[in-house]
Image: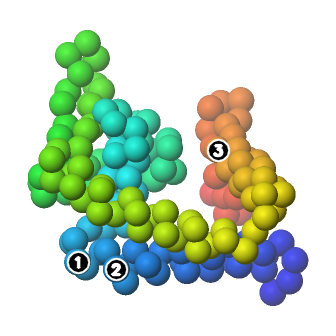
Amino acid sequence: MTGKSALMHDMLKLNNRLMAPFSTHLAHRYRISLNEFRLLMAIGALGRTASHEVAEITGVNVMSVSRAVATLQRHGRVEVIRDEANRRRKWLSLTDEGRRLYAVMRPQGDKVADYLFSGLDENDLATLADLVERLTGRLEATDANGQSAFLEATKPEGS
């Protein structure tokens, strides 16, 4: 593999390596999936938020958010309250148990970030942040019909 394809696979490898501390230290101990962890961290950071906002912030698709929220709710970690003004909106917030778990898990995320970025100077970090923002923007762009430009451009032939 060479060029852009190799770089993309390196990025996928980076993502997988970043998940190792989660799966090694947190997943089994706290019986939480990766998507549940992502949502717990997002809700904990935001406070009360809506399901669609969590999906947008985390990049997790709406169906996966719904499943993860249901599991978090079943385990007493998230409270779901239907918005009286907009019956389609559900407000999410952490329960006492969710806040306890967030307090345990947040420092782990900070440790991972500190370790990963400790070898980079401020210019490297700024450049990386800019590149990540640009790439994410490209992946989140929509076409004139409101469809994902990324998914439309990467459809298999004949679809």
Residue 9 is situated, as x and y percent measured from the top left of the image, at 70, 78
Which quadrant would the C terminus be assigned to in this image?
bottom right
SS class of the residue under badge 1? helix
Looking at the rendered structure, the kind of residue marked 1 is Arg
Q: Is residue 30 above or below residue 46?
A: below
Sequence order check, earlier mark of 2 and 3: 2
| Label 3 environment density (alpha carbons within 10 Å; few <14, some 14–19, many ≥20) | some
Residue 140 got which mark?
3
Q: Amino acid at mark 2?
A: His
Q: Is residue 128 shown to the viewer in this render?
A: no
> Can I make out residue 22 in this image?
yes
Quadrant for residue 132, please give it: bottom right
Residue 125 coordinates in the image, percent (x, y): 75, 59
* Labels 2 and 1 touching (C-beta < 8 A): yes
List the residue tagged with mark 2.
Answer: 25
Q: Which residue is mark 1?
A: 29
Question: Residue 30 at what x, y percent from top left?
Answer: 22, 71
Per the model, the C-alpha gap separating discs 3 and 1 is: 34 Å
Q: Nearer the viewer, residue 53 or 47?
A: 47
Check disc 2: other Cα within 10 Å, few if <14, some if 14-19, many if 20+.
few
- The residue positioned 86% from the left and 83% from the top of the image is 2
Neighbours of disc 1 within 10 Å: few (<14), some (14-19), many (20+): few
Question: Farthest top residue?
Answer: 85
Q: Which dot, 2 or 3, sits closer to the camera?
A: 2
Q: Assign a secondary structure to mark 2.
A: helix
Q: Secondary structure at mark 3?
A: helix
At 23% from the left and 21% from the top, the residue drawn is 83
Amino acid type shown at disc 3 = Glu
Q: Which mark is residue 8?
A: none
